[in-house]
Every structure is written in C-alpha cells, then in structure tokens.
Image: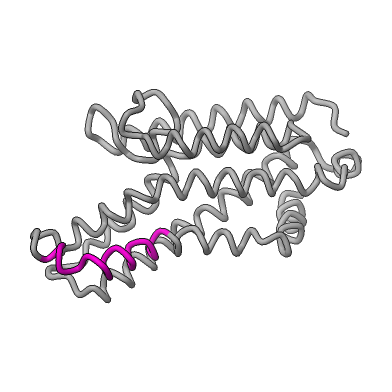
Amino acid sequence: MMIKMLSSEFMKIRRKGLWFLTILGPLGVVSLQMVNYGLRKEWFISQGTYEWKYYILNVSAFTPFALILGIVILSSFMASIENETKAWKQLISLPVTKWSVYLAKYTILLFLLVIASSLLVIFSLGFGIYLNFDGSIPFFDIVKYSFFPLFAALPVLGLQLWVSIVCQNQGLPITLGVIGVILSYMAYFLPDWMIWKWPSLDNSWEEPLVNVCLGLGVGFVLYLIGMLDFTRRDVN
C-alpha cells in the first residue's frame, strides 16, 4: 500500500517544479561561492585561507538558510496540491489510512531533501576540485556539512509540513516559514533551544552532533504530533 501511495505522490509532483527547486537549492549555494572565489581569489590567497577548510566553511555558511527556505517552499507546494483542488475528502475516501497519506508526503519531502544534500556534496566537491586547493580532499567534511544540517533541520520539516497540511490557506505556513528563514540567518544570536538554529550546527558545546541528535529526536516527535493531529481532523 505504501508503495502505491509513494508512486501517487511522485506523480502529483511531477509537473509542480519540486524537482527543479531540489536542484536549484544546492546549485545556488555553490554558485554563490563561484562568485565569491571568482571575485576574491587573490584576497583568499593573501590571507592564507585559500584551502579546503575555509572553502567548506564558506559553503556551509549558506547551507542552513537555503535548506530551511527549501523546506518551507517544498512543504507548502506539497500540501497545496490537495488544498487547491479540495481533493482531501476524495483522497481519504480511498482505501488508505490518514497516517499513510501523511507518511507518504513526509517521505517524499525527506527524499527530495536527501537528493538536494547529495547534490550539494557533488557540486561542492566539483567546484573545490576546480579551485585546485592544496592537500588531500576532505571527503568526510564535505559530506558532514552537507547532511548534518539536514538531520538537524528535521524539526523544521515536521513543523512546516504539519502546519501546511492542516491550514487550507497557505498564508500562515508561509509566514511561519519566512520567520524561520530570517531566524536561521541570525542563528549565531539565537539560544540553543530554538530549532531554527540547529541546522547551523552551532551550539554552546561546540559539538555539531548535539544538533544532529536533537534534530533527529525532536523531528520524530514533531512528525508524530503532526500525523496524530492530521488523523483526528475532518478534512474538506
């Protein structure tokens, strides 16, 4: 049954531009570094920062912002498919459970985000090789700073999908998302308990794994809360 649900969701998003956005996010992050290093290469060399370590830090500085923005847009698009056509009752009338519908949408979004993080690894690695830094390629660090923010951002995904699905008018989810994007840009100044800070991997313990573990745990809890709330609601 879940295979059919996932296939159905993939068919729905085929012409909605979600795949384009999935590619655009990581490409945009690395493109910013193309401009950065294209204009300031000599400055990086003069400062002694023309190396893999600082390049990865520069890429990772924009990753949380792009990731949360992507979550907001993808979640809203995913929920609006049924909201715009008022097809929730038609969907629920099929021999499927509400929790399986919610799980299918969550799974599709998570899959798209994993694809985006994988593309970020490829694009970051490709441009880094092009820049011809000295020393060995830090494959683990590239993967770490591409996927750890995703794991830490799972609470944002759970919250945005929940609000986007239960609200027919996408104004509230978009407003919440915009606030989240702004907060992620100010992550350095936020307290450690705010979920929009976690994708930055910054905390008072200076240990990124803390954010990852919090993201996985709280993300699962928010997913369950959203699913239970959706299953108890009447759909229109």
- Which secondary structure class fits the magenta region best? helix
Residue that protrudes farthest toward the front in the picture: 39
Q: Is residue 211 left or right of residue 70?
A: left
Q: Is residue 43 left or right of residue 218?
A: left
| x, y percent for residue 9 | 73, 54
Numbered disc total: 0
Classify 43 as above or below 145.
Answer: below
| x, y percent for residue 209 | 31, 37
Classify 95 as above or below 15.
Answer: above
Is residue 221 on the magenta stretch?
A: no
| x, y percent for residue 96 | 82, 42
- Residue at point 32%, 62% (across, down): 33
User: What is the span of residues highlighted in magenta in the rendered image?
Assistant: 29-45
Q: In the rendered image, which quarter is residue 48 located in? A: bottom left
- Residue at point 32%, 68% (across, down): 125
Q: In the rendered image, which quarter is residue 224 located in? A: top right
Q: Is residue 188 left or right of residue 118?
A: left
| x, y percent for residue 119 | 45, 64
Q: How is the image coloured?
A: one colour
Residue 65 or 99: which is nearer the viewer? 65
Q: Is residue 83 left or right of residue 142?
A: right
Residue 185 or 121: which is nearer the viewer? 185
Image quadrant occupied by the C terminus: top right
- Residue at point 33%, 68% (across, down): 34
